[in-house]
Structures are given as C-alpha cells and as structure tokens.
Amino acid sequence: MEAAIADLIGDRTDLSALNMAGLTDWDICSRILEKCNLEPTAENIEQLEKLYIKHLPEMLLRCRGYVLAGVREILENLQQRTDVLSLVLTGNMEAGGRAKLAHYGLDSYFPLGAFSRRSRERVEIAQRAMILAEQQLGKLTPDRLYVIGDTPHDVRCGQAIGARAIAIASGHHRAEELRA
C-alpha cells in the first residue's frame, strides 16, 4: 500500500502503525487517506484502490505470506463434497482478493465470492455471501453456515448472519481476542 500512496501523494508514508487486519479495503483506504491528510472521498478511495491493484503483484512477490499447514488438504476435501459450497467472504475488493487467491494457488477452490465494495461494514459482505450461497443451495439454516477467520471482525461478521464462527488463532490475534 505504501507504493500506492507514494504514487498518489508523491511521498512514502509509514503505515506500520495502522492495524488493518479484518478491515475492508474501503475502510483501510479511508484510514490511509485520513493519515495522509486527504479527504476520504469515493473518488480518492477509488484512485488509491487502482494504484494498490497496480502494485499488488510486486508486493505479493516480496511479502512473506504463506498458506497455513493443512489448508489445501481441507479445501481439497471440501471441494470433493456435494453437500458443501466453499466461497470466499473477504474485506478485499474483488480484484485484490482474486489476485491474492491466485498468488497462493487457492483461486480454484473459490469460484464464488463476496468481496468488499463501497463499504466499511463486513456484515454487508457476509449478507452478500449468504445470498450467493442460497442461490446455489436454496434456503440455508444457521446450522449449515460456517465463517472461518482469523480476526475478531471475521467472527463478528459470521455471527451477524447467524453462522457458526470458526476462529483460527494464526498469530495476529490471540485465542482470547477471538472468543470475545
């Protein structure tokens, strides 16, 4: 994101103090613009998002991200089942979310997804995910819905649509934070 900001304002900005985990891209861009003393208008946010997408491939090559052990095997198993529909529910805008899934080789597991649009609210994304799932499977009851995530925001958005939340303490948040 630093490279996108540098393109936008002509200077590097230290974003290390911003906690972005679990936020929507719209919210992240708003906060970054405010930190840079720029108005978080829709136009400015969209401009920053475009610059972010431009720099995302090189950033993904430099970062040290990885797929947690066992995730591919679980996704492979779920993909073979006819009673399960896996879809991605993320605060990323669609172009960014799809690029990240492809970079880590997970895109084939998630042909459907609910992504961030012009919103700071993850609950709206969760509601869109529910609609997508019901279009594929028919009316769903809460006992058939699971949201898996690693931030308190993920847990809350799952709870907001009546889903069972499975929290993964992957290192960013302690188990106690995820239970709250």
Image (spheres, rainbow, N blue to C red):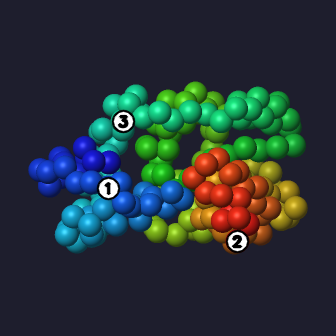
Under mark 3, the amino acid is Met
Q: Residue at x 70, y 32 (%)?
A: 69
Q: Residue 125: percent from the left, percent from the top?
A: 58, 62
- The CA distance from mark 1 to mark 2 is 27 Å
Around disc 2, counting alpha carbons within 10 Å, would you say few (fewer than 14), some (14 to 19), or many (20 or more)?
few
Is 94 above or below relative to 26?
above
Identify the mark at residue 15; answer none if there is no mark: 1
Around disc 1, counting alpha carbons within 10 Å, would you say few (fewer than 14), some (14 to 19), or many (20 or more)?
some
Identify the mark at residue 90; answer none if there is no mark: none
Q: Quadrant of the C terminus?
A: bottom right
Q: Which numbered mark, 3 or 2, is in the foreground of this view?
A: 2
Name the secondary structure under disc 3.
helix
Q: Which residue is mark 2?
A: 180
Around disc 3, counting alpha carbons within 10 Å, would you say few (fewer than 14), some (14 to 19), or many (20 or more)?
some
- The CA distance from mark 1 to mark 3 is 15 Å
Q: Which residue is mark 3?
A: 59
Among the two numbered marks 1 and 3 on one chain, the one whose residue lies closer to the N terminus: 1
Name the secondary structure under disc 1.
loop
Q: Residue at x 20, y 68 (%)?
A: 38
Under mark 2, the amino acid is Ala
Q: Residue at x 29, y 39 (%)?
A: 54
Q: Is residue 158 visible?
A: no
Q: Residue 114: percent from the left, percent from the top?
A: 58, 53
- The CA distance from mark 3 to mark 2 is 33 Å
Under mark 1, the amino acid is Leu
Relative depth, front residue between 163 and 130: 163
Q: Is residue 176 visible?
A: yes
Tag 1 and tag 3, C-beta contact below 8 Å: no
Number of residue marks: 3
Residue 33, image quadrant: bottom left
